[in-house]
Image (cartoon, coloured by chain):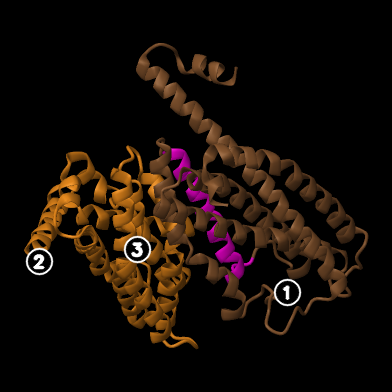
Amino acid sequence: MLKYANPTLFMGLAGRLIPWTAALGLGLIGVGLYMSFLGSPADYQQGESVRIMYIHVPSAWMALFIYGVMTSAALGTLVWRHPLADAAQKAAAPLGAAFTFVCLFTGSMWGKPMWGTWWEWDARLTSMLVLFLIYLGLVALWRTIEEPTRAAKAAAVLTLVGVVNIPIIKFSVDWWNTLHQPASVFRMGGPTIHSSLLWPLAVMSLAFTFLFMTMHLMAIRNEILARRVRRLSMEAASRGEAGPRAVVRGATA
Amino acid sequence: MRALKSLFLREIRLARRIGGGGATGVVFFLILVSIAPFALGPDLNLLSRIGPALLWIAALLATLIGLDRLFQADAEDGSLDLMMTARTPLELVVLVKCLAHWAATGLPLVIAAPLFGLMLAVEGEALWGVTLALLAGTPAITFIGAIGAALTASLRRGGLLMAVLVLPFTVPVLIFGVAASAAARGGTVPFWTPFSILCALTLLAVAGAPFAAAAALRHGRE
């Protein structure tokens, strides 16, 4: 397992994995969408709008899961100083922001007919918004610091500081008794949600996980390639022989 | 210990001599407070209700102003390198620098808060509540901000980025600070409940932030 920490071996492994994860992700999305829109009953209280949940809940889980991935990559950066961990961190941040945005957006769409409001400053919504802002801050930090290893370390420190928000999001519905409904799937004493609704949710969550894996692997590969291009063009510039563009063309040829 | 004391005095002296330090912060605080009635209309009932919240937002922004120079100025003239190679642990250096920064910019805000509160028709118990809450909460803002300042120390124009990085993390301080100020006006929650949580947040920031900021500084200088 550890030998794939070598970027070149990782590139090969990722290249072999991506078609499989992509096929699994897309196939499961197809099945999951069929199950959530056609194969499952409407809720007796919420009617058809319950189907928003099949997008909303998996993206919320992904938003937290990606932060977990980013946190372990941040530890990899700070403790083992591994370039692959840097790339994994950098690739995860925009994906996390996107899933968090989908979660907030679909939640807002569901909230209007159900709660009668697009937005409510309740604990779960607010802490999720803070997570979104932290993701955006990380993306901004990555874009501002030019040197990749220094950017990775700064982002890692910020990521580890931001971990405090994750338990707040998870337990916000238990600690504060507010509008957002409490946990109904992962809770003591089993899920309180009917199995006809639970199955599409499970398939969609799996699909989102594979989709994230595909995009994450692709983004890590891009990042490694971008770094190689950067290093090659810097070497060429220091030799003073060719402009960066010429080297990039040479690298791909 | 002597090194830390002289560092504290140096920071205070620098803050006083360069750019007005605390005084500019207080003037900015005053401007923010006086802009609000123009935006909201001079309705004293409304102002008195949202006054504590306005004071908190103004204090939050005024504390962040100038925080981006906390390590940047030292990084530019090389004194940061001296501090990092010194025998004194960098964490303690960060702690002392933050304390000095708070004493030079945060404390004047707290002292000025009762005066500005009167302008927003915050009176009596509520005024003391918000002042006490600011006294307990502004150190947390300074220390959390120090992490952002350390992350952006080597950047040319890190000010805006620092605010973007830091402001999400100040949300809990703002929530419990405003909750304590609101509780002081009377209500179902006693003042001490949110106030104790606010104090806990400050202690947590004072204890934890120097380590994060020192780590960020070390990694930023490699």
Question: Which chain is rendered brown in the image?
Answer: A
Query: In the rendered image, what is the letter of the chain coloured orange?
Result: B
Q: Amino acid at mark 2?
A: Met
Q: Residue at x 53, y 60 (%)?
A: A130
| Closer to us: B37 or A84 | A84
On screen, residue B144 versus residue A101, left or right, reads left
CA distance separating discs 1 and 2: 54 Å
Q: Report the disc number at residue B141.
A: 3
- For marks 2 and 3, give the CA distance: 25 Å
- Place of residue B184 in the rendered image (x, y in percent of width and height, measured from the top left): 39, 82
Q: Is residue A193 left or right of residue B160?
A: right
Q: Are marks 1 and 3 in contact (CB under 8 Å)?
A: no
Of labels 2 and 3, earlier in sequence is 2
Q: Quadrant of residue B127?
A: bottom left
Percent of width and height locating residue A26? 80, 47
Q: Which residue is mark 2?
A: B1
Query: Which of the two residues, B21 or B203, is positioned nearer the viewer here?
Result: B203
Q: Which residues are magenta?
A: A120-144
Q: Which mark is residue A185?
A: 1
On whether residue A140 falls in the magenta region, the answer is yes
Residue B62 visible to an observer of this rendering? no
Tag 2, which secondary structure? Answer: loop
Furthest residue toward top: A241
Q: Are marks 1 and 2 on the same chain?
A: no
Q: Nearer the viewer, mark 1 or mark 3?
A: 1
